[in-house]
Image (tube, grey):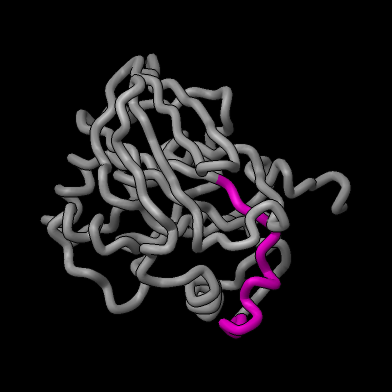
Amino acid sequence: MAASRPLSRFWEWGKNIVCVGRNYADHAREMKSAVPSEPVLFLKPSTAYAPEGSPILMPAYSHNLHHELELGVVIGKRGRAVPEASAMDYVAGYALCLDMTARDVQEECKKKGLPWTLAKSFTTSCPVSAFVPKEKIPDPHNLKLWLKVNGELRQEGETSSMIFTIPYIISYVSKIMTLEEGDIILTGTPKGVGPVKENDEILAGIDGVLSMKFKVERPEY
């Protein structure tokens, strides 16, 4: 079974995309939101994945699509109520991700006290880079993330600025839902989120590790 489900292509078979909101204080302030005292969680379906080479499709019901750059943590084995001290044993590797957000829809959901599903969970709302094995990133809390739109630098942040660390997040999430091999946790976005439009090109990267490129398209349906 393992041979037919390589972690290097986790997006083809991984079940769960768990997202942590407002995990950078500067982004929380940018969104005029309180800095959280515990992780804010939401989910995306596995059909949200868009591997590099495929487009980001703008949802027809949104007119203000935003990019949010995030480090993704790929889970390597099943875990429930994982102790924080051993949480990194459950990490198989990493990926750079975008949490594409229909900001206008999210603002309406917030006003009405509704879940964020329409804003966060549409098809292609989770573009992902190639898989990076754990061994290639000795310290995931010492990375520089960046994102450009049409060559203009929009987001730049250090993972050292995360409010909740990766071991804390894994432990916290696993006490709520069982994590499984191939799942991914998106660890939040630094400041600088902003809009993209049809035909924009997004280039994003982890300094010294990898980069990825996506084009934004308006689907015909």
Quadrant of the rendered image containing residue 119 = top left
In the rendered view, tell whether residue 198 sits above or below residue 126: above
Instruction: Please name whichever residue, 110 or 155, is drawn nearer the observer in this view of the structure.
Output: 155
Residue stretch in magenta: 81-95
Q: Residue at x 87, y 52 (%)?
A: 1
Instruction: Please name whichever residue, 114 or 51, is drawn nearer the observer in this view of the structure.
Output: 51
Q: Is residue 47 visible?
A: no
Q: In the visual, does 13 lie left or right of 96?
A: right
* Residue 219, horizontal then vertical, whole percent: 39, 18
The verdict on residue 83 being magenta is: yes
Q: In the visual, does 58 lie left or right of 3?
A: left
Instruction: Please name whichever residue, 87 or 205, is drawn nearer the observer in this view of the structure.
Output: 205
Q: Is residue 96 visible?
A: yes
* Residue 19, horizontal then vertical, whole percent: 43, 58
* Residue 13, horizontal then vertical, whole percent: 68, 46
In the rendered view, tell whether residue 169 sits above or below residue 116: below
Q: Residue at x 60, y 42 (%)?
A: 209
Q: Residue at x 67, y 40 (%)?
A: 12
Q: In the visual, does 24 lie left or right of 184?
A: left
Q: Residue at x 88, y 47 (%)?
A: 3
In the rendered view, tell whether residue 157 sits above or below residue 77: above
